[in-house]
Amino acid sequence: MFINIVKNSILGNKTQKILSFSTIFLATLLLSCMLNITLGVGNELGKELRNYGANIVVLPQGASLNIEVGDKSIKPFANKTYLELKDLYKIKEIFWRNNIAAFAPFKEENALFSSREIALLGTYFDKNIPIDGESDYRTGFINLYPVWQIDGRWVDDLSKDYEVNMSKELASSLNLKLNDEFSVLINNENIKLKLVGIIKNASEYQNKILINIDNLNKILKQDGNYERAQVSALTIPESDLSQRARKDKDSLNSLEYDKWYCTAYVSSIAFQIEENYAGASAKALSKVADAESSIVKKIQSLMSLIFIICLVVASVAMASLINSDVFRRQKEIGLLKALGANNFQIYLIFAIDCLIVSLIASVFGSTFGFFLSDLIALKIFLHTINYNFIIYPICMLIAAIISLLGALLATKNYANMQIVEVLYGRK
């Protein structure tokens, strides 16, 4: 008999069921969308920010002792120190190797162009650097800044000619056009260069001429070496643990150290590079890392706030719908009580009714929420984000809690009503 009562309750009053289904559907749609974006935004935003430069710098040991004063760098040691290009692959051969998105070596030398001093910056543009298990791995300047646009083409790393790229501003100030050949004076020797590409919005490189680093070493008559390497690594936002480790790793106990070491913090990745690369010192670019962490945390906080608002609104709406249904069926409640039903049994009828509708609605809402999060990600990141299927049980649990609490609040108002007054329509 109880099953028949529940069945009739579910199938009855289709308008109320449609409204309940719609409420939970829309609520879980928004919840799953926000949750999926919140859980995925860290990785996706990190990938997007990695298109705009490095967050780790690798230097020869001792070179990292430069003192930054304002926008100037003061070097305590006059002599330059170098790392070997043949050891460049060691940057990626660490525990978090798959998080190393790109890296490139850099070496700078001053040159004269028509009595004007200008910096010649050597680097790799798109270089094959064999890694253990990845013999065809390619990286370089282009991989560090994939969103940069260029008129012409990038320097060919295999070219024997001294090809160069430079910013639009620098080319204009030097009165150079695409495919122009010009000479610079380096170490009292005239070197002929060819401009094969002009970079738009070159930011910090707008006053430098970019050349293949092997050709620069050839011009300088030096062995294959470089001054520094910039590394773009996919990381997660910094936490109190990582900030403590950045200041003093020795302050961590063994459990904290293992957690920090095995988590993709920018500080732990930098430490592993330094650990694996003898003679090198790797450090996180703290301004970049802190800015990324701040942006990700703010977006996640915003999504969490929207999540809470959706939850509260859905709870209020669902409680109102259940309350109106209970009010409409108060004579039925009075009759059930007259036949001997206790308060728990009456509550159970409404709870099961709402629970079944809510669970079905939450499954549909979560599914459509994934599609909505994809559309938002496509609009923002120009590609989809991964589905976090843990959101299904989370949304179903939230829908169940909303339904059970709503049924409890609605039915308790009629628990102590006078049966005779209800049946005679005086209530």
Image (cartoon, rainbow, N blue to C red):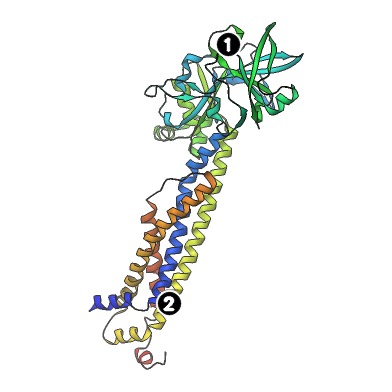
Visible residue check, residue 75 = no
Disc 2 marks a residue whose amino acid type is: Asn
Residue at 31% x, 87% y is 335
The quarter of the picture where residue 264 lies is top left
Q: Which residue is mark 2?
A: 323
Left or right: 27, with 210 as reference point: left
**Image marks 2 and 1: residues in contact by CB distance under 8 Å:** no
| Percent position of residue 381, x then y | 52, 44
Disc 1 marks a residue whose amino acid type is: Asn
Determine crowd level at label 2: few under 14, some 14-19, many 20+ residues with C-alpha closer than 10 A.
some
| Percent position of residue 221, x then y | 59, 6
Quarter in which the N terminus is drawn: bottom left
Q: Which residue is mark 1?
A: 217
Mark found first going from the N terminus, 2 or 1: 1
Relative to 401, does residue 374 appear above or below in the rendering? above
Residue at 60% x, 20% y is 65
How many numbered marks are there? 2
Identify the disc placed on residue 188. none
Work out which residue is located at the far front of the displayed protein and give it.
Answer: 179
Quarter in which the C terminus is drawn: bottom left
| Percent position of residue 177, x then y | 70, 23
Per the image, label 1 sits on a secondary structure element best described as: helix
Residue at 26% x, 86% y is 339
Q: Observer-nearest residue: 135 or 293?
A: 135
